[in-house]
Amino acid sequence: MTEQPGLRTTLEAGMLLVELNRPEKRNALDETVQGELLRLFEGAAGDAEVRGVILTGSGEAFSAGGDLSRFERDWNPAEFRAQSHELSRLISSIERLEKPVIAAINGLATGAGTQLALSCDLRIASESARFLFREGMIGFIPSHGGCVRLVKLVGLARARDILLGGEDLSAEEAFRHGLVTRVVPHERLLDEARERLRHIFKRAPQAYGLSKRLLHLSASVDLESGLFAESLAQSQLIGTEDHKEGVRAARERRRPSFTGR
């Protein structure tokens, strides 16, 4: 286990557990935590020991988003946009990482904390998890992809219900809306996330990474562009050792042994 300001990380069996660790601030994101998280996610891309990531929070919250102190100063608009771009870069880095990332949502998620969760590949929620869309209460809107990601994930009609309806969502309500993959008892949360990663690890890493990027791309492009991107990815994968091993294993009726090459 290693600790940085506001973060705790553990690497075991290829699984990097990243725990937001500011429970007294409901795991709000200050500039230090943002920088450390970005370093971790960008570093994980080239770290062969990291096969997948679990993101969770300590205490009773997943993340309350941006630290309120950030909004209590007089901002120059250009400076605020520059700071905002850095937070958007962090959240987008999760989608760019060609390895599985699972959010284990242990409690409250709001603001940028919700965007962190929505950018993950899968979202496992504790029964005590809650999603709060209260940016309007401080004269803001969901940003850093908050509106766009929500529409792409659950569709326009449900996104309207969530954002414009103004209701807080329990874990079960979030599941019904399609915000989370599964709801589990609180004490089972990390075990479930680890079990999902172990299941994903059975697949070829390069194929998983390219599938992840293609799904993200497909939400924004036309059919012909999507077909071309799929063809490029497939032409890359057909020459890999993992593809050859997968075909051999299928013929021999055994489980493949992938190496990521």
Image (cartoon, rainbow, N blue to C red):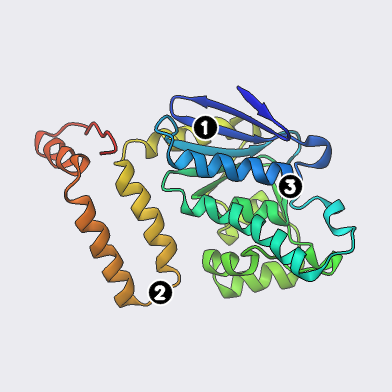
Dividing the picture into quadrants, the one containing residue 79 is bottom right
Residue drawn at the location 25% of the way across and 39% of the way down: 261
Residue 221's disc number: 2
Displayed quadrant of residue 202: top left
In the displayed structure, does residue 44 sit left or right of residue 25?
left
Within-10-Å neighbours for mark 2: few <14, some 14–19, many 20+: few
Percent x, y of residue 166: 77, 67
- Which quarter of the figure has residue 186? top right
* Mark sitting on residue 31: 3
Vertical order, 222 against 170 (above or below): below
Label 2, label 1: how far apart the Cα atoms are: 32 Å
Report x, y in % for residue 52: 46, 37
Going by the numbered disc 1, the residue's amino acid type is Leu
Which callout, 3 or 2, points to the residue nearer the camera? 3
Q: Is residue 42 above or below residue 252?
A: below
The CA distance from mark 3 to mark 2 is 33 Å
The location of residue 104, given as percent across then percent down, is 59, 40
Residue 222 horizontal/vertical position (percent): 37, 77
Give the mark, 2 or 1, whose residue is nearer the N terminus. 1
**Residue assigned mark 1:** 16
Circles 2 and 1, Cβ within 8 Å, touching? The answer is no
| SS of the residue under disc 3 | helix
Q: Is residue 82 left or right of residue 208?
A: right
Say which amino acid is labelled 3.
Answer: Glu
Q: Is 2 above or below relative to 118? A: above
- Amino acid type indicated by mark 2: Val
Q: Evaluate whether residue 128 shows in this view.
A: no
C-alpha separation, residue under disc 3 versus residue under disc 1: 22 Å
Q: Secondary structure at mark 2?
A: loop
Q: Residue furthest left?
A: 251
**Res 249 visible:** yes
